[in-house]
Image: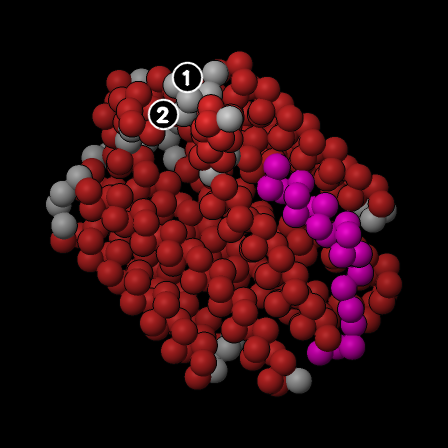
Amino acid sequence: MVKDFGHIGALLRLIRLPNLLIVAATQILIRYCVIRPLLGQANMSLQLPDGLFAMLVVATVFTTAAGYVINDYFDRKIDRINKPTAVIVGRQVYPRHAMAYHLFFSITGTILGVWVSFKAHVLFLSLIFFMVNGLLWFYSTTYKRQFLLGNFMVALLAALVPFLVLLYELPLLAREYGSQVNPMVRYLMIWVLGFAFFAFLLNLIREFVKDAEDLEGDKVFGKKTIPVVWGIAATRWISAAILLLAVILLMVAWYFYIPDGITLLYFIFFLIIPMLVAMGILLIKNSSGSFHQTSLLLKFILITGLSYMIVVNIIINRLA
């Protein structure tokens, strides 16, 4: 029994359970705290049934889990150098079992994605799950070793998580409301793409920071990451510059689109100040542990950025 619980714990670490919960929460909040109240302002309603949406969330979570498993499967040799105490595949989970888990999560996620697309009469959207599974496989085997390509791919896939919810809703809205929905499309796109772009930037920085943490193993196995090609100092400055860009974009978004007092306070205390602290850690601290501290802080910022959707719901309902 103890061995069984130990294996379950290893599996949960392998699939990054906290990250999967963030993925699920992102899609749930973007649907119910952003898209639904915005549609409500135009006397429109969500068209994808809740049951199918739940299946879409599970499909996304399973596809993400498959990506984590296959990444650890192919990285098990590098991980023995970069993080020897945290290696799972090959020590806590047999490689053949890891491959079986990958196949289960990827195939089940794709089947669910196809079923949701079929039932919602948007079968063409099921191609996304085939594409993402293919990209995750080739990322783990090839793309992550190429300069910047793997970093941008992970960041783009992270941005796809909230956008996928809108992708499934738009064709159904057009079918139900016709041309009446056209004015809402731009509004919905601005909001959802805003969250998606924020996720893209934060995940891109995290990718650079994690590459800096994994410098030694990446050098040994010939990976062409920014820390390997341009050095640690360049990685610090590039990551800090993107953080500064994110801060500027947040202020621009507040000034032009959401000049609300609650939003300003939320941005300052839960996003901008943590981002400035992360910049300070990157540029001032020169210890190897500074990248790990920055990575944890960036995850906190991602979570607070996600939580802002709840604030958006409050603001929209107050204006209704």
**Do the residues bearing badges 2 and 1 touch, measured as CB atoms within 8 Å?**
yes
* Of 102 and 251, the residue lying toward us: 102
**x, y (%) of residue 217?**
27, 23
* Of 306 and 178, the residue lying toward us: 306
Residue depicted at 27% across the width and 50% down the height: 294
User: Distance between the Cα atoms at labels 2 and 1?
Assistant: 7 Å
Would residue 170 be visible to someone looking at this image?
A: yes
Would residue 222 be visible to someone looking at this image?
A: no
Residues rendered magenta in the picture? 41-62
Q: Is residue 31 magenta?
A: no
Quadrant position of the C terminus in the picture:
bottom right
**x, y (%) of residue 218?**
29, 24
| Secondary structure type for disc 2 | loop
Residue depicted at 56% across the width and 59% down the height: 193
Q: Is residue 58 magenta?
A: yes
Mark 2, Cα crowd under 10 Å, few <14 / some 14-19 / many 20+, is: many
Relative to 20, say whether 148 is above or below.
above
Mark 1 is on which residue type? Gly
Q: Quadrant of residue 29?
A: bottom right
**x, y (%) of residue 33?**
61, 67
Residue depicted at 20% across the width and 57% down the height: 280
Horizontally, residue 124 falls left or right of residue 239, namely right
Q: What residue would you read off at disc 1? A: 90
Relative to 191, say whether 211 is above or below.
above
Mark 2 is on which residue type? Val
Give the number of callouts.
Answer: 2
Mark 1, Cα crowd under 10 Å, few <14 / some 14-19 / many 20+, is: some
Q: What residue would you read off at disc 2? A: 87
Residue depicted at 66% across the width and 47% down the height: 57
